Image: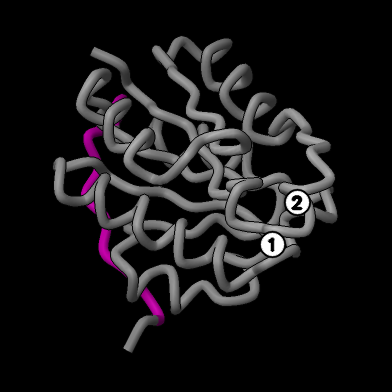
Amino acid sequence: MTDILFGQSYFLRFDPKLWEAMQPYPPLGTMIAAGFMREKGYRVALFDAMLADSTAEWAALLDQHQPTFAVIYEDNFNYLSKMCLLNMRAAAFEMIRMAAERGCTTIVCGSDATDHAEAYLNAGAHFVLLGEGEETLADLLDQFTIHNSQFTIHYLQ
């Protein structure tokens, strides 16, 4: 079983203009966060949505890995994360729903989630990390795994 399934919600296929240009990029921020958590001792897997056909591929990896935590971690430094934003946000919300249906604690980090944290929480995310989140993610997961802490959502009315 995997502790954390990392993913990002930038599906190149959902952006017709850039799909036609076919210039994919690796999800560096997601990969950095996954590598950081692996160094901390967590078992991680990675879903790269860039060339995926749909969120069904995320669902398949959720079923395969059965993670405790599903982390949708966007590249804050890449301009593509702001392209076709409503399509990508809808994909993120669908990924959150799929993870929650499987009992995962769902954590989101990215510029859109930072700007619209309440929307992501309302979509079912358990936590939204603001800004660059590697250290915050490690602290949060350590609270769950080492200290067995329970959390509630604050400031959401």
Q: Hey, what amino acid is under mark 2?
A: Asn
Q: Hey, what amino acid is under mark 1?
A: Ser
The residue range painted magenta reads 145-155
The residue most toward the bottom is 157
Most foreground residue, 71 or 18: 18
Residue depicted at 62% across the width and 17% down the height = 35
Which of the labelled discs sits on residue 23, or is there none? none
Q: Quadrant of residue 3?
A: top left
> Is 109 left or right of 3, judged from the image as shown?
right
Residue that carries the numbered disc 2 in the rendered image: 76
Residue depicted at 25% across the width and 49% down the height = 98
Q: Quadrant of residue 14?
A: bottom right
Q: Earlier in the sequence, mark 2 or mark 1?
A: 2
Relative vertical location of residue 23 with respect to residue 127 in this rendering, above or below: above
Q: Position of residue 111 (x, y in %)?
A: 69, 62
Is label 2 in contact with label 1 (beta carbons under 8 Å)?
yes
SS class, disc 1: helix
Most foreground residue, 48 or 24: 24
Dot 1 alpha-carbon crowd within 10 angstroms: few under 14, some 14 to 19, many 20 or more: many
The magenta stretch spans residue 75: no
The magenta stretch spans residue 150: yes
Relative vertical location of residue 39 with respect to residue 64 in this rendering, above or below: above
Q: Position of residue 18 (x, y in %)?
A: 78, 52
The residue most toward the front is 20
Residue that carries the numbered disc 1 in the rendered image: 111
